[in-house]
Amino acid sequence: MIPWLDSFSLDFPSPEQALHEPNGLLAAGGGLEPERILAAYSQGIFPWYMPDDPILWWSPNPRMVLFPDELHIPRSLAKTLRNCSYEIRFDTAFPQVMTCCAAPRKGASGTWISQAMQDAYCDLHRMGYAHSVETWIDGELAGGLYGVALGDVFYGESMFALKPDASKIAFARLVPWLAGHGFRLIDCQMRTDHLTRFGGREIPRREFCTLLTEFVAVPRTPRLWHHDIIHGGSGTRT
């Protein structure tokens, strides 16, 4: 059995109480208020559930992370970054990015990014906490990702690509941008081969939560990032 959260308190059980199977399931219920989601992220917890299920809260062990200075760019992608004409924009199409991330994937029948989740993260975006990183090619949105920033931590949520490598381009350009702005940790939640190729690795949940205690406490005023653009090939920021 897992605890059922009420709608009055923002308290969560300790992540150490999460189930081993399914890995990381911690609690159910509550709501998707911005304050609750931010409280969850600050403790290493995130919501993930299908539309017909109650809200489920997770904190898996181990935790997949990427330290910005450990970023690895695969050779084929490095060639694309040098030769492809593109722009990386921030926070100029957040709702559209979420809609694209919510679209059913090949071989999948549904999505966990329900309308309720989209509404919740759009609220966080308006508050300056949730951000989109967008790859634009020939003036059209070609791919990207979204996530949440707290202190010196960026929590990646989902990505999409309408053109080959478009989401990878966004991620590869985001990581150095985050490093240049003082971010020290990227939460990738769960292991994938894709993230491993970029230098992501698993660490124990307890270590992850200890890092959060330090990194999330760093004062950083929430704001939109739309004034920054990274141009393909040169990496010039304007």
Image (cartoon, helix red, strand yellow):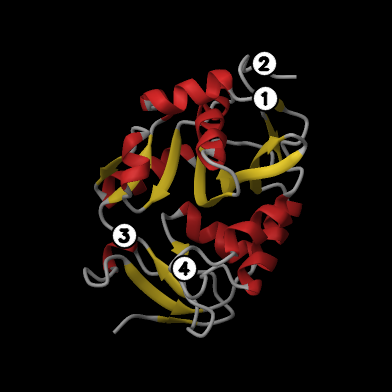
Q: Residue at x 62, y 62 (%)?
A: 35
Amino acid beneath label 4: Trp
Front of the two marks 1 and 3 = 1
Amino acid beneath label 1: Ile
Q: Residue at x 27, y 72 (%)?
A: 22
Image location (x, y in percent) of residue 196: 31, 39
Would you say the residues marked 1 and 3 are in contact, meaning their CB atoms lie under 8 Å apart?
Answer: no
Label 1 belongs to which residue?
Answer: 230
**38, above or below 156, in the image:** below
Q: CA distance from mark 2 to mark 3?
A: 37 Å
Amino acid beneath label 2: Thr
Label 2 belongs to which residue?
Answer: 236
Q: Quadrant of the C terminus?
A: top right
Label 4 belongs to which residue?
Answer: 48
Tell me which numbered mark, 2 or 3, is placed earlier along the sequence: 3
Q: Which mark is residue 60?
A: 3
Tell me which numbered mark, 4 or 2, is placed earlier along the sequence: 4
Front of the two marks 4 and 2 = 2
